[in-house]
Image (cartoon, rainbow, N blue to C red):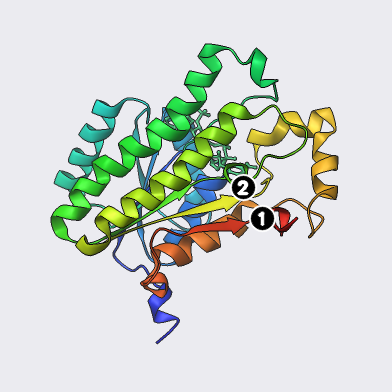
């Protein structure tokens, strides 16, 4: 009975930024649990590579190109998917970007706006667009990918834009969860530590990564599949009483 609650057979799941990294790992986890997968990303070629990677593991997926910062395009995408496949049961708002560390006083307007446009606005546009369809059918589960950087400010500093965007995602999660809890739609977040994907390549090059590993109680970074398995649980019926949670997936980093 308990393991059955983790199955997602027949559910339709959408993952933004799904062509690589954490998004692709989440897609694989949800597909393995039985979900029908749709990958969204802003680059068609990257999506083909993501689908090929899933196919290599034995899972099929559909894909659509959309830029999550374009609220109209996101709504159109949610409407098209609902018309062609039925309303999504699961949304993973995962697409995000980072910038190399820079002192807050030196942050350029363009970088502040770009980071917040993808990491915060993009999450809201997706939650709202797909959430509308979930609310209409009275069921759905959303996971927003936050970050431990939305919970703490890590050394060395210089991530004011990224930190602020992720903290906002966590509180957006609380807000949507409270508003939609009585209408069948659960909204949770995960707050991962450093995960070994291209997004943190600059930290490996600069030597920062070694310092961060030393700061982590478990002494290591995460792997994308270690985030994916938590996300899978959160969208499953195993987490039927959970909404509005921000779940650290961080090797203990935020304990210190
Ligand atoms: P990646 O850079 O590997 O993947 C992110 C994906 O999102 C890329 O395919 C990227 O496409 C896509 N994307 C970016 N902007 C947009 C957009 N405007 N519209 C559609 N798709 C877009 O990142 P990760 O897998 O590492 O990160 C995934 C999420 O996890 C992010 O929200 C990140 O902030 C969060 N996170 C990551 C951590 C880490 O250490 N890696 C730690 C904590 C949180 P493109 O190549 O075109 O940019």
Tell me: residue 32, above or below residue 172: below
Q: In the rendered image, is residue 128 in sight? A: yes
- Residue 148: mark in rendering: 2
Q: In the rendered image, is residue 184 in sight? A: no
Determine which quarter of the picture holds residue 72: top left
Instruction: Give me the residue at 79% from left, 43% from top.
Output: 212
Circle 2 Cα neighbour tier, 10 Å, few/some/many (<14 / 14–19 / ≥20): many
Say which quadrant the C terminus sits in.
Answer: bottom right
- Local SS, label 2: helix
Determine which quarter of the picture holds residue 93: top left
- Residue 81: mark in rendering: none
Q: Position of residue 79 (x, y in %)?
A: 18, 40
| Residue contact at pointers 1 and 2, CB within 8 angstroms | yes
Q: Position of residue 84 (x, y in %)?
A: 17, 46
Q: Position of residue 218 (x, y in %)?
A: 78, 60
Instruction: Give me the residue at 39% from left, 33% from top.
Output: 122
Instruction: Give me the residue at 62% from left, 42% from top.
Output: 149
Looking at marks 1 and 2 on the same chain, the residue that comes earlier in the sequence is marked by 2
Residue closest to the eye, 38 or 70: 70
User: Which residue in the protein does label 1 denote?
Assistant: 250
Q: Is mark 2 within 8 Å of ligand 1?
A: yes
Circle 1 Cα neighbour tier, 10 Å, few/some/many (<14 / 14–19 / ≥20): many
Residue closest to the eye, 220 or 177: 177
Tell me: residue 100, above or below residue 78: above
Q: Position of residue 89 (x, y in %)?
A: 28, 57
- Local SS, label 1: loop
Instruction: Give me the residue at 81% from left, 48% from top.
Output: 213
Q: Is mark 1 within 8 Å of ligand 1?
A: no
Distance from label 1 to label 2 (Cα)?
A: 7 Å
Tell me: residue 253, above or below residue 33: above
Say which quadrant the N terminus sits in.
Answer: bottom left
């Amino acid at each position: 009975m308990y393991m059955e609650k983790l199955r997602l057979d027949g559910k339709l799941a959408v993952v933004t930024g799904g062509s690589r990294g954490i998004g692709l790992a989440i897609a694989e986890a949800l597909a393995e649990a039985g979900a029908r997968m749709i990958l969204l990303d802003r680059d068609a070629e990257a999506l083909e590579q993501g689908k090929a990677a899933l196919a290599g593991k034995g899972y099929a997926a559909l894909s659509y190109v959309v830029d999550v910062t374009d609220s109209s395009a996101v709504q159109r995408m949610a409407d098209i998917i609902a018309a062609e496949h039925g309303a999504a049961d699961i949304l993973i708002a995962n697409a995000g970007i980072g910038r190399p560390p820079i002192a807050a006083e030196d942050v350029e307007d363009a970088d502040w706006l770009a980071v917040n446009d993808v990491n915060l606005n993009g999450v809201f546009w997706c939650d709202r667009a797909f959430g509308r369809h979930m609310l209409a059918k009275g069921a759905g589960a959303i996971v927003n990918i936050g970050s431990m950087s939305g919970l703490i400010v890590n050394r060395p500093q210089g991530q004011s834009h990224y930190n602020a965007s992720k903290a906002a995602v966590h509180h957006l999660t609380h807000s949507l969860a409270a508003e939609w809890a009585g209408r069948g739609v659960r909204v949770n977040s995960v707050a991962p530590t450093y995960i070994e994907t291209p997004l943190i390549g600059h930290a490996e090059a600069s030597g920062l990564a070694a310092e961060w590993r030393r700061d982590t109680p478990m002494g290591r970074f995460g792997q994308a599949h270690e985030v994916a398995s938590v996300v899978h649980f959160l969208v499953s019926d195993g987490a039927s009483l959970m909404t509005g949670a921000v779940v650290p997936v961080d090797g203990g980093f935020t304990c210190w």
